[in-house]
Image (cartoon, rainbow, N blue to C red):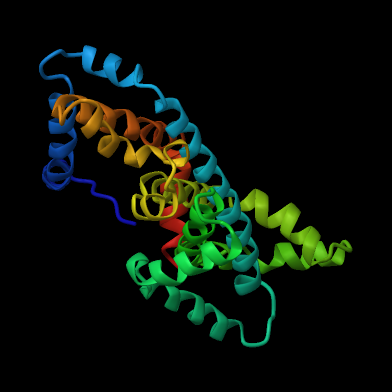
Amino acid sequence: MFEVRSLRGRILLQIAITLLVVPFLFPLVTMVQGSLAGDGWANYEAVLRVPGLWRFFVNTVVIAAAVIVIVYVVTMLAAYGFGKLHLRGREVYFWLLLACLTLPEVVLLAPLFTTAQALGFFDTYWAVILPLAALQVPFAVLLARNFVHGIPDELFEASRVDGANSIRGFIHLIIPLTRPIAAAIFIFTLIGAWNNYLFPLVFLQSTEMQTITLVPQFFVGQFSNDQTKILASAVLTAIPEVIAYLCLQRLFERGLAAGAIK
């Protein structure tokens, strides 16, 4: 981290940051303006009155919550093992896990589809939850392992002197001390699960099982391709993620900065 002390440096830094942010804000501003075109707030009222909309939200919340829980538990256990426990071949397993980051979703569709049908998961929550969680874990472990590695070893040695085993060390040290990186993992996992379009489209065929990412496509038929209503549905879809980030912003930034530096 660095600090700019001079007034000129701060002004130049602020200008540079603003120029970098503008390209990302422009699509958002355009989307909000488009959603208010024509009938204005009536576009949102029309979207909220569509039957089944809240079912899409419930499905998305269930899937996102399950993915977050699975990713958090698996990631923290793996980070604890890779960062603090003396396991034979742990570096080999760690790099094998990171190799999974090179696998795109499209390549996995065929084997996942066959597996979901064989296990009877097709058109159920688990057909989306398990693949999403598996794809989120490698990057989350990469962040969490570096964070856990930075926790002083003296804390764990002191806990062993007091008679705590590895499980108690995980519960009483890892979980409380990893809140910042847990917030970062929560945000990344929520975005990945909430915005995923491919898996729900392929694995959830019935309308009552579909997620909020399919709402704009659903509204194309509902509103005869009325772009204002479709943009309004897209804005409503993004609101939960924005709220989650604003609530966890401070922990997210701390965790991301600490987890990215070993």
Reply above or below: 53 against 218. above
Q: Position of residue 230 (x, y in %)?
A: 21, 30
Viewer-proximal residue among 55 and 42: 55
217 left or right, relative to 60 = left
Q: Position of residue 49 (x, y in %)?
A: 35, 16
Which residue does the image show at 40% across and 31% down from the upper left?
243
* 50 versus 139 height, above or below: above
Left or right of residue 13: residue 212: right
Relative height, residue 223 to residue 21 (above, below): above
Q: Residue 63 vs residue 160: left or right?
A: left
Residue 211 position, x and y percent, is 41, 40
User: Which residue shows up at 69% across the image and 80% down it?
Assistant: 86
Q: Position of residue 180 (x, y in %)?
A: 52, 48
Residue drawn at x 43%, y 34% is 56
Q: Nearer the viewer, residue 68 or 181?
A: 68
Q: Quadrant of residue 145?
A: bottom right
Relative depth, front residue between 155 and 220: 220
Q: Residue at x 72, y 59 (%)?
A: 170
Q: Nearer the viewer, residue 137 or 87?
A: 137
Q: How many marks?
A: 0
The quadrant in which residue 149 appears is: bottom right
Quadrant in the picture for the N terminus: bottom left
